[in-house]
Image (cartoon, rainbow, N blue to C red):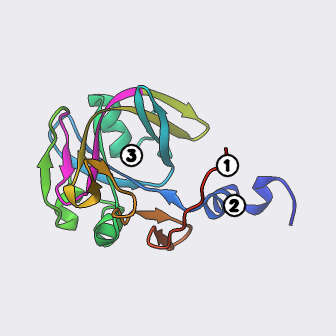
Amino acid sequence: MKGEPSEFGAYRLLAGAVVPRPIAWVSSRSGDGVDNLAPYSFFNVVAVDPPVLMFAPVGTGEDLKDTPRNVLDTEEFVVNVVTADLAEAMNATSATLAAGESEFDHAGLEKADAERVDAARVADARVAFECRLYDAIEVGGSTMILGEVVYAHVDDDVATAGALDVTKLDAVGRLSGSYYATTRDRFAMERPP
């Protein structure tokens, strides 16, 4: 098989081959005080100094869903890391709800207050990053949202000697269609000099 991405269906090709993708479970708050929570698998780290994360929801301009609209309006949000025990709840928050209905309530998730931003976080998330809007860039039919991490929550259960321990964080990644992956199957390789 060879050809232009559109010949294969660009979304299916990219989403099926660029795997596993980490999931940003983004919580935000509307100007009316409604808490929103939605998963995004077009997500990654962009920079360390300053610490910046990125997620890219589909939609631009007037065609934005609640999360990116809230972030652009308030300039604040939280990225919660999805672990295996929260996977079903994360999936429940991907449902299409009426405007003004909270995904926290829909999925039966407990909220916790953020320390530095005006948005709730998932209380049971082992890792959560409070972010302030760094920039937003329209890329084709999506809006890439860049957030500077201003505060981090790391559960002691996933830390060793005061640092995040990747062997203790059972993060979930997005594959394609209805498929997901965990980080339970790990291997290590030493980087050559």
Residue shown at the point (80%, 59%) measured from the top left:
7
Q: Residue at x 50, y 46 (%)?
A: 58
Q: Is residue 132 magenta?
A: yes
Compared across the picture, whether 114 is left or right of 17 comes to: left
Is residue 165 visible to us here? yes
Residue receiving disc 2:
13
Residue highlighted by disc 3: 65
Callout 1–callout 2 Cβ contact below 8 Å = no
Q: Could you give the CA–CA distance between mark 1 and mark 2, rounded to whole angstroms? A: 32 Å
Using the image, determine if residue 3 lies above or below residue 118.
Answer: below
Q: Which residue is mark 1?
A: 192
Q: Nearer the viewer, residue 142 or 163?
A: 163
Local SS, label 2: helix
Residue at (47%, 41%) from the top-left corner? 45
Let me know if residue 56 appears in the view. no
Q: Which residues are magenta?
A: 117-134
Q: CA distance from mark 3 to mark 1?
A: 45 Å
> Residue 97, image x and y in percent?
29, 59
Spot occupied by residue 129 in the image (x, y as percentages of width and height): 29, 42
Disc 3 packing (10 Å; few <14; some 14–19; many ≥20): some
User: Residue 35, image x and y in percent?
Assistant: 19, 47
Q: In what quadrant of the picture does the N terminus appear?
A: bottom right
- Between 10 and 24, the one lying in front of the other is 24
Q: Amino acid at mark 1?
A: Pro
Question: For the residues marked 3 and 2, what is the alpha-carbon distance in whole angstroms?
Answer: 24 Å
